[in-house]
Image: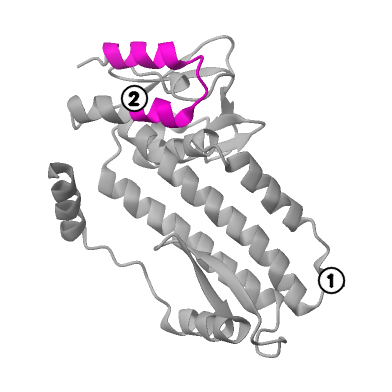
Amino acid sequence: MEYTELSQQLAEKKTNSDPDETLSIITNYLELHPQPQEEKVTINVTQGEDTLIVETANGVLLNNILPPGTRIIRSEFNEASIKDGNILIPKEFERMGLLGKVNLAHESGHILSPDDVALVKKEKEAEVTELQSLDDAGKIDVLLIERNAKMEAEIEAWQYGKTVADVLNVDEIMYEDLMQFALENYYMKSLEILATTVDLENVTPKDKVIRILEPRSQEYLTMSLGELNAYITNMYETNRIISIDRKFKRSAIAASKKE
């Protein structure tokens, strides 16, 4: 089945840079026109070998979902990425299957997120701060600005990327699984950076209150530095692994769609 009507709607919206309105058009259309289970992504090269059009087998152009002026370009790297407001996709993208499509959807989410540029700027500004000149409490403040901005940008990118994943016919449960796995890894990396940069056992004042963005709830946890030390210690000691009950998640999603 070709999504001629959806393709036309997206083409007409190309002059409008509001990503939320664009994603609403896609979501509403896909709810009324479910995709077949087997769907491939084809790549057509236009305007020179480094400028690509990404088109699904039923005729939806990813290029028309992205904001005006966004280019999709070949890259030598093994993962999709963002550079100068454009999406770089691997040379071997067509052979990457599910992971390639999920990666592309996620990076498209960065482009579509209205807060991404500001969050990345905030993260980079904190990154270049000279930590050596700060006491431990000051170092924690800077590190949390950087890591919280990074986490917020990643959460938003995964959320905005969901609709692109739908267009690429990525299984909803698989996308959620990979999203949670990636966010959990970012979170554990943040805790590791805090633990290795600052002596949390001896940092003062221990009652200083901090906030850290937690990926499962997607809410900020508020705790003292003493509590943060105990929290990180517990995370390492328990070595918790993401547990996925697929049957429960599928039934929950199915129930939500019936409401």
Q: Position of residue 158 (x, y in %)?
A: 44, 45
Residue ID at (73%, 77%): 137
Residue ID at (33%, 26%): 26
Rendered image quadrant of residue 72? top right
Give the distance between the C-alpha atoms of the residues marked 2 and 1, in whole angstroms: 50 Å
> Would you name the residue on which mark 1 appears?
132
Residue ID at (58%, 84%): 229
Name the amino acid type tagged 1.
Gln
Image side of residue 15 versus residue 143, left or right: left
Dots 2, 1 in contact, CB < 8 A: no
Observer able to see residue 198 = yes
Q: Position of residue 149 (x, y in %)?
A: 61, 54
Q: Main secondary structure of the magenta part?
A: helix
Foreground pick, 67 / 74:
67
Image side of residue 162 versus residue 209, left or right: left
Circle 2 sits in a helix, a strand or a loop, which is it?
A: helix
Foreground pick, 48 / 201:
201
Q: Which mark is residue 25?
A: 2
Determine whether 12 is above or below 188 in the image: above
As for residue 10 lying within the magenta part, the answer is yes
Q: Position of residue 79 (x, y in %)?
A: 52, 41
Residue ID at (65%, 43%): 118
Image side of residue 55 versus residue 149, left or right: left
Q: Where is the N terminus found, in terms of image quarters?
A: top left
Q: Where is the C terminus found, in terms of image quarters?
A: top left
Q: Which residues are magenta?
A: 4-24
As for residue 242 lying within the magenta part, the answer is no
